[in-house]
Image (spheres, grey):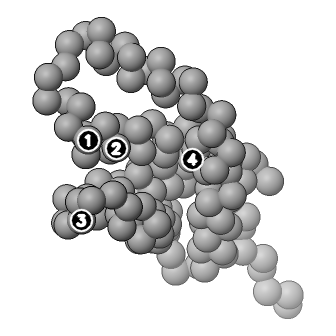
Amino acid sequence: MKRYLIFALVGPFLGGFLLLLTTTYQSGYWAQTSLSEVGKLFVVFFKTLQYSYLFGFLPSLMIGAVDDILIHVRRIGPVLRMLLVGLFAFILASLTYSSRGPDSGVVQFILYGLVGFVPAVVSSWLVHKYVEEPQPAAAPT
């Protein structure tokens, strides 16, 4: 249960921030910026945080379910599990977001993929670090 709580809290927060950074980069906002413009970015982020959780809650729980499934495979270690979960989230986020807007290409595919990859890997790492993982049961003798 703690696994899903971590994914539900961390995923939409980081994903929403990275999605905001990606869309502002794609729009050309960072070409002429000052310190006050960066302040506006954080104001927008905190004003839209409720929507990040509204739309990011279920995808984060789905990625948490993938992590939960992979933890029961004995041959997959924690680092490989983090990378597999991140790769799965990268592909899903890229397919979901990269076809939006007038631009399409490798840069857009990678930037939107990182919107899914980073929160998934960070959440999986936090789960590995702070949640007790189930131990395999011993065979009865």
Q: Can you tell which mark lies on residue 51?
A: none
Q: Which of marks 3 and 1 is nearer the N terminus?
A: 1
Q: In this view, does 78 lie to the left or right of 109?
A: right
CA distance for labels 4 and 1: 24 Å
Residue at which label 4 appears: 11
Q: In this view, does 126 lie above or below 39?
A: below
The answer to which quarter of the image holds residue 93 is bottom left
Q: Residue at x 69, y 58 (%)?
A: 58
Q: Circle 1 is placed at which residue position?
A: 27
Instruction: Please state the horizontal and vertical placement of residue 7, each as a whole percent of the image.
Output: 63, 50
Q: How far apart are marks 3 and 1 (CA)?
A: 13 Å
Farthest residue in the top direction? 36
Q: Is residue 58 above or below residue 12?
A: below
Mark 4 vs mark 1, foreground winner is 1
Q: Are marks 2 and 3 in contact (CB under 8 Å)?
A: no
Outermost residue, right side = 140
Say which element carries label 3. loop
Q: State the residue position of label 2.
A: 23
* Mark 4 surroundings: few (<14), some (14-19) or many (≥20) residues within 10 A: many
Are dots 4 and 1 in contact, CB under 8 Å?
no
Q: Examine the rendering and report whether any part of residue 64 can be seen.
A: no
Q: Residue pushed farthest front? A: 102
Asked if the residue under mark 2 is in contact with the one under mark 1, i.e. CB atoms within 8 Å, the reply is yes
**Label 1 crowd (10 A; few <14 / some 14-19 / many >=20):** few
Instruction: Quadrant for residue 42, please give it.
Output: top left
Q: Are marks 4 and 2 in contact (CB under 8 Å)?
A: no
State how far apart marks 1 and 2 are (Cα): 6 Å
Residue under numbered circle 3: 104
Three-letter code, disc 3: Ser
